[in-house]
């Protein structure tokens, strides 16, 4: 399995948004709680559409929620 | 453990138990006489159709029971839709499942090429169907636990 290079701050952002639960975020962006769990654990890179929906749920830009960690560049 | 992981594990157990019990039930009914008789072909045709129908019914019943038990034990509702992660994992499971079945199918045809009795061909086909079902469920468990 390829290493997941897309990281995110979802857990921190949920905490900062009135301690939003995983289920609440999942309902807001139209996925299951399992997907939010997988995203937070870095086990899944979301589609561009889902990434935008999550960023909109926090009223933030995409880059403020997701980041790319390229380990090949030194 | 999440709903999807639990459901996949239940599916694996169901497939194994169903296959073993069905095989134990049907195998003694194998007709006496020649391996290539019309009765033998009828037996295998009956075996495959019955196994397919029984496994569909059992999967539906187990799924309903599982959902009831899941609601009672976790006080959560089961997901009512498949999102993009579910669909992606489902696609990977189907791919692996088809691969295993095609390998079994080719092996079954190979058994005819080397003049094995048709009974061997049917056994390989049925066993590869079982293995492909199992592979699909195991792939789901793997990806739900380890990620995509």
Image (cartoon, helix red, strand yellow):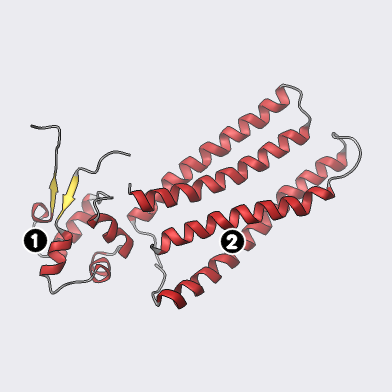
Quarter holding residue B5: bottom left
Could you say whether the residue bearing mark 2 is in a helix, strand or loop?
helix
Per the rendering, the mark at residue B59 is 2
Image point 38% across, 53% down: which residue? Answer: B144
Could you say whether the residue bearing mark 1 is in a helix, strand or loop?
loop
**Residue located beneath label 1 in the image:** A60
Q: Residues within 10 Å of mark 1 (few under 14, many from 20)?
A: few
Q: What chain does badge 2 belong to? A: B
Image point 59% across, 54% down: which residue? Answer: B15
Per the rendering, the mark at residue B31 is none
Q: Residues within 10 Å of mark 2 (few under 14, many from 20)?
A: some
Report the side of B107 relative to A10 (left or right): right
Residue lying at the far right in this picture: please name it.
B33
Q: Nearer the viewer, mark 1 or mark 2?
A: 2
Q: What chain does badge 1 belong to? A: A
Report the side of B30 relative to A21 (left or right): right
- In front here: A26 or B68? B68
- In front here: A61 or B128? B128
Report the side of B93 relative to A31 (left or right): right
As drawn, B133 above or below B57: above
Give the spatial CA distance, label 1 vs label 2.
44 Å
x and y, in percent, of residue B102 in the image: 57, 35
| Quadrant where the N terminus of chain B is found in the figure | bottom left
x and y, in percent, of residue B56 in the image: 62, 59
> In this figure, what is the number of numbered marks?
2
As drawn, B37 above or below B10: above
x and y, in percent, of residue B132 in the image: 56, 43
Image point 57% across, 66% down: which residue? Answer: B62
Image point 10% across, 65% down: which residue? Answer: A59
Report the side of A74 relative to B44 (left or right): left
- In front here: B55 or B143? B143
Disc 1 with disc 2 on a shared chain: no
């Amino acid at each position: 399995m390829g290493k997941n290079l897309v990281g995110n701050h979802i857990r921190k952002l949920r905490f900062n948004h009135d301690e939003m639960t995983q289920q609440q975020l999942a309902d807001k962006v139209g996925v299951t709680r399992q997907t939010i769990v997988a995203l937070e654990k870095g086990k899944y890179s979301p589609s561009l559409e889902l990434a935008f929906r999550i960023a909109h749920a926090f009223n933030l830009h995409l880059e403020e929620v997701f980041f790319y960690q390229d380990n090949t560049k030194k | 453990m999440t709903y999807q992981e639990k459901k996949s594990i239940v599916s694996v157990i169901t497939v194994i138990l169903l296959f073993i019990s069905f095989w134990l039930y049907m195998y003694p009914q194998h007709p006496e006489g020649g391996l290539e008789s019309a009765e033998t072909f009828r037996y295998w045709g009956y075996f495959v159709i019955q196994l397919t129908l029984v496994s569909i019914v059992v999967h539906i019943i187990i799924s309903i029971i599982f959902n009831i038990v899941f609601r009672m034990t976790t006080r959560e509702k089961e997901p009512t839709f498949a999102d993009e992660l579910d669909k992606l994992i489902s696609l990977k499971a189907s791919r692996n499942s088809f691969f295993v079945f095609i390998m079994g199918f080719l092996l079954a045809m190979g058994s005819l090429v080397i003049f094995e009795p048709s009974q061997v061909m049917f056994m390989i086909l049925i066993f590869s169907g079982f293995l492909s079902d199992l592979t699909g469920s195991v792939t789901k468990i793997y990806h739900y636990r380890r990620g995509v």
